[in-house]
Image: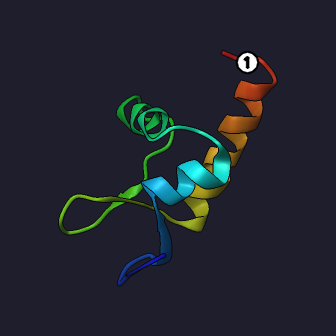
Amino acid sequence: MTEGAAWGTALTVGQVGERFGVTVRTLHHYDEIGLVRPHRTATGYRVYTDDDLERLRHVVVYRRLGFP
């Protein structure tokens, strides 16, 4: 886990991918299309807060149910 001044404890893209069973590329794609927008560190790394994880949780469930 990572500590950030503005967002508290957050997970990296790799940690989130493992936790949700999706690839890093999928997470990057969701970011690119605006589906899930994680926060960025000062150096540009994506970090996922609790709010980001909640949104991703919904996206993953809908995708597994077959929604486009």
Q: Is residue 64 left or right of residue 12?
A: right
| Amino acid of disc 1 | Phe
Position of residue 58 measured from the top left corner of the image (x, y, whole percent): 71, 42
Name the residue rendered at 69%, 47% in the picture: 57
- Residue 56 in the image: above or below residue 64: below
Residue 33, percent from left and from top = 40, 28
Q: Does 68 appear above or below 45?
A: above
Q: Residue at x 55, y 55 (%)?
A: 16
Quadrant containing the C terminus is: top right
Q: Where 46 falls versus 24 (above or below)? A: below
* Residue lying at 39% horizontally and 38% vertically, measured from the top left: 28
Secondary structure under tag 1 reads loop
In the image, taking residue 38 as reference, residue 59 lies left or right, namely right
Which quarter of the figure has residue 67? top right
Determine which residue is flagged by label 1: 67
Q: Quadrant of residue 31?
A: top left
